[in-house]
Structures are given as C-alpha cells and as structure tokens.
C-alpha cells in the first residue's frame, strides 16, 4: 500500500463543533431524501396523473433542476460575499431551513389533483429548489472552514456523511412503511405522506438550528472570510473554469449523481411489482442499502490511514460491478423461492452500497482538497463557489436522470398501473372502502403486471449506472492529480506562504512605527 501523508497544519476541531455540525445533517437529509426519493412515488400513487400530466411534471422537474443547478454557483457567490456577525454560512443555513421546511409540508399536504396539482407543483418545486439551495451550499461549504488537517477533515467528512446517511436511511426506511401498505398512517398513502412530511420538516428545522447555534469555525477561516473581497459573476466563472482539477472532479460527480441513485429511483416501483404492495419490503431493502453504504462512513478514518484514495477507487468500482451483476442475475438466470430471491437481493445491495459509499467518500474529500489547491493557485479559498459544484452536479444529474425515468416509465406503461393503484388509495382516503377491499384490489392490479415490465425496470436499474460509474473511475484515475502526497505538499506551501506574509506584515508595521517615531 502507498504511504499516507500527514498534514503540517494541526487544526483541532472541538467536540461541540464536530457533533453539532455533523448531527445537523440528520434532519437535513431526511427532508432531502423524502423529496428526492419519494416525490415521484407520492405523485404516481396518490395523484392519478395521465401520461401527458406525468410528462409535464417530468419536464418541470428537468427544467427546474437544470435552472437550479445553474443557479448554485450564484448562491455560492452570494455566500462568499456575505459578511455578518454570524459569518457567511450560518445566515443562509437558517433562512434556507425555515422556508424550505414550510414548502415541503405544503407540497405533500394540500389536496389537489389533476392540472390544479400540476400548476401548484410547478410553482412550489421552484421555490423548494431555491430555498434548499440556500441551506445546502451553506451547510457543505462550512465543512472545509472547520479544519485544514487531513485527518480532522476525513473524520468530519465521514461523520457528516454518516449522519446524513442516517437521516437519509430513516426517511427511506420509514416513509414507505408509514405511507403505503397495511402500516400507512391513516390507512392510505394520502394521509400517510402528509403526516410524514410534517414530522420530517420539524426534525429538519431542529437539526439545522442546532448546527447554527453550536458550530464554531476555525480562526484562520474566519480571518480569511473577513479579508475576502466581493466576488462578481465573471470572477466566479474564472474560479470554476480556472481550476482544472475541480472541473475533472465535477464531471465525475455528474456521472455519479446520474448513475448511483437510479436503483433507488426505480426501486420502489420495482419492489411493489415484483414482491408485493407493502412498504415493509422497501423499508427492509432501504435499511440493508443504508447499512452497506453507512459502514464505510464508520470505518473510513482508519480505512484511509491504510489505503490511499487511488486504491480505494479501484476497490469501490470492483464492489459496484459485483453488486450490480448479482442484482441483475437474481431472478433472471436463476429462479428461487420469492423469500430466497429477496435475501439474495439484499446481499447484492449491501455490496453495491458499500462500493458506492467508498466512491462517494472519495469524491467529497477530493472536492474539499481542491479548496486548498485553489488557495495555492489564486490566493483565495472560495469554499462557497467550489462546494456549490457538489449540489450543482447533483441537480444537473438529477435532471438528466428524470428525463431517463420519464422515457422508461412511458415506454413501459408504468403510469397506467400506478394510476389504478392511486384510485384505490384515494377511495380509501375518502372512506369509500376499507383496508381489506383496498388490499385485494391492489393485489389484483399487481398480479396483472407483465414480467417484461419488471425485467425492463431491472435492465435500466443496472445498465446505466455501471457504464457511468466505470467511466468516472477512469477519469479519476488518469485526470485527477491531488492525491495524499500532492495535498500534503500544497499544505506545506500554504503554511510557508502564510508565514512569509506574517513576517512581511510585521516588518511593514515595524517600519511604520519607526517612521512615526522619526517624525516626532
């Protein structure tokens, strides 16, 4: 194994800052996961949209996500230009969470259908994107300002991803259990989604307020913030396109964001069609997937001490390939009892999630390290702008993924099936049928789903991710140059530069003092 290099800047993070920052991600990612993972499921299984309405909703999703992605660097620039007693990150974390939580609750609660819902959705989705961007970029941009020490940063990154992942898995696991099937709150998906959205919104606010109150940034980062000059759009573009390492990394992040969540995007529908309309099945798989992905966050600091990032990348892509292959072959090349197939599916998802967890952890740390690279090259850190690339690529990838989902769902006729289930859910919400009738009617709908439909979903869930993540691996391997040794060298040069500047400032002050004494 290659040598792992230590940082020359011993920047210690206090326990209070470490825990209040990282725990703040729990509620934040619960809200994001509910919205990003189950919004489409909520619409398909409770609103009864036609193919035309589904196409319009998908188009709204695509256009708004592209616009919001383009707008992310602008938000990063606004953060960079913010000067307040709270710093440049905390005001936007607070404003973003309060407004976004309200919008999230309204989207899942108002009883609108048909074109009325489509119009309402278009307006609210845009507002949701704007407000979440405020919180998202400010929250993640704060991370590099807490420490420049690689070990501290690795710990913070792994803890932040761990608790964000915990929030995500809580939302992924509990949402289907509490909204669809026999355990739904109120007995149906309509009331279930409303209750879950309100509860998660409250948790989102509590967690982010804790971060705002509890986090203390490093003195060096605060000093640099106070000295920073205002940044205009032209300079923002210069920062982004002038950092070649950032651009290569952004390309990989785009491919990762398109590919890695395809299995989740189709997963709920696939599970309902293949194993039955019970949110418990989705909950089990969500927990399994989270355990696989969360495991790397627990062991990563020790893992990173023994294995360098290039080697980690190789391990990750092998695990991803094995996981997707097992996922596809299960129930296709071999047939087994449904319970056995479900267990084998869980095994495949653990392997896949662990591999993707390593892959994503590398991307996050590499992105953090481009900040010091930017500081060395330009004399400015620009955390807000650089970390804006993370949600920028996530949203651009999500837009491209949504186009893919729209095409697949329309070709496979998924909306015809979900509309039939939606009618049953709404009848239950109106009190027209009881749970027994609801269950039997939905079971009959599921039994009529053709095998080619579920096979088509599985092909889409495996093919696109494998191609994109493999290409991303080779880009990282051959184009991204900031490994452990390079980063250590960057920190040494920054320390030398800061020391030299301090000496020059001291000399200038002494000269001014001598001149003043001579004048007297």
Image (cartoon, helix red, strand yellow):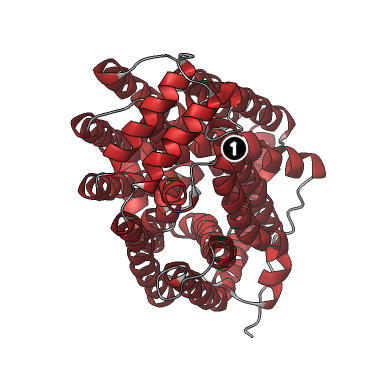
- The residue at the far bottom in this view is 1
Closer-to-camera residue (337/329): 337
Q: Residues within 10 Å of mark 1 (few under 14, many from 20)?
A: many
Instruction: Report the residue marked by disc 1.
Output: 177
Rendering quarter of residue 128 = top left
Q: Position of residue 314 (x, y in %)?
A: 51, 78
What's the residue at 52%, 31% (across, down)? Answer: 135
SS label for mark 1: helix
Closer-to-camera residue (355/92): 355
Q: Relative to 74, is 137 on the left or the right?
A: right
- The residue at the far right in this view is 15
What's the residue at 54%, 47% (across, down)? Answer: 282
| On-image quarter of the C terminus | top right
Q: Position of residue 173 (x, y in %)?
A: 60, 43
Q: Relative to 438, is 142 on the left or the right?
A: right
What's the residue at 36%, 54% (across, down)? Answer: 258
Q: Position of residue 268 (x, y in %)?
A: 46, 46
Closer-to-camera residue (333/19): 333
What's the residue at 28%, 28% (across, down)? Answer: 49
Vertical relation: 307 (above or below) 456: below
Vertical relation: 151 (above or below) 122: below
- The residue at the far left in this view is 52
Rendering quarter of residue 479 = bottom left
Total labels drawn: 1
| On-image quarter of the N terminus | bottom right
């Amino acid at each position: 194994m290659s040598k792992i290099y230590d940082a020359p800047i011993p920047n210690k993070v206090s326990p209070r800052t470490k825990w209040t920052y990282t725990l703040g991600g729990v509620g934040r990612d619960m809200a994001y996961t509910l919205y990003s993972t189950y919004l489409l499921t909520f619409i398909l299984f409770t609103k009864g949209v036609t193919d035309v309405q589904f196409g319009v909703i998908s188009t709204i999703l695509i256009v708004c996500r592209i616009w919001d992605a383009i707008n992310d660097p602008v938000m990063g620039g606004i953060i960079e230009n913010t000067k307040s007693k709270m710093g440049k990150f905390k005001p936007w974390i607070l404003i973003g969470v309060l407004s976004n939580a309200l919008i999230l609750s309204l989207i899942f609660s108002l009883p609108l259908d048909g074109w009325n819902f489509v119009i309402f959705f278009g307006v609210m989705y845009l507002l949701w994107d704007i407000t979440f961007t405020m919180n998202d970029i400010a929250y993640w941009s704060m991370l590099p300002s807490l420490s420049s020490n690689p070990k501290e940063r690795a710990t913070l990154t792994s803890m932040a991803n761990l608790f964000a992942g915990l929030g995500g898995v809580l939302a992924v696991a509990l949402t289907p259990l509490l909204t669809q099937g026999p355990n739904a709150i109120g007995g149906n998906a309509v009331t279930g989604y409303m209750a879950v959205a309100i509860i998660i919104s409250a948790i989102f606010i509590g967690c982010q307020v804790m971060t705002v109150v509890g986090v203390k940034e490093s003195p060096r980062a605060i000093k640099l913030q106070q000295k920073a000059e205002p940044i205009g759009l032209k300079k923002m573009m210069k920062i982004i396109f002038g950092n070649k390492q950032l651009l290569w990394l952004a390309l990989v992040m785009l491919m990762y964001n398109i590919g890695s969540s395809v299995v989740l995007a189709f997963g709920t529908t696939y599970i309902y069609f293949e194993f039955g309309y019970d949110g418990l099945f989705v909950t089990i798989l969500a927990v399994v997937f989270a355990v696989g992905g969360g495991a790397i966050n627990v062991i990563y600091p020790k893992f990173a001490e023994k294995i360098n990032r290039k080697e980690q990348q190789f391990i990750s892509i092998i695990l991803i390939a094995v996981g997707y292959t097992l996922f596809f072959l299960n129930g296709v090349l071999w047939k087994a009892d449904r319970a056995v197939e479900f267990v084998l599916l869980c095994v495949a998802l653990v392997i896949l999630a662990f591999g993707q967890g390593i892959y994503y952890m590398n991307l996050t740390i590499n992105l953090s390290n481009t900040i010091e690279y930017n500081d060395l090259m330009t004399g400015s850190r620009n955390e807000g702008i650089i970390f804006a690339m993370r949600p920028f690529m996530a949203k651009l990838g999500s837009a491209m993924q949504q186009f893919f989902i729209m095409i697949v769902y329309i070709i496979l006729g998924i909306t015809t099936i979900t509309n039939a289930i939606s009618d049953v859910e709404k009848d239950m919400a109106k009190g027209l049928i009881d749970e027994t009738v609801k269950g039997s009617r939905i079971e009959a709908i599921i039994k009529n789903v053709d095998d080619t439909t579920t096979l088509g979903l599985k092909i889409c869930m495996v093919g696109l991710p494998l191609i994109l993540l493999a290409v991303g691996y080779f880009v990282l391997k051959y184009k991204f140059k900031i490994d452990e040794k390079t980063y250590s060298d960057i920190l040494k040069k920054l320390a030398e530069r800061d020391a030299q500047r301090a000496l020059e400032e001291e000399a200038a002050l002494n000269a001014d003092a001598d001149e003043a004494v001579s004048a007297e």
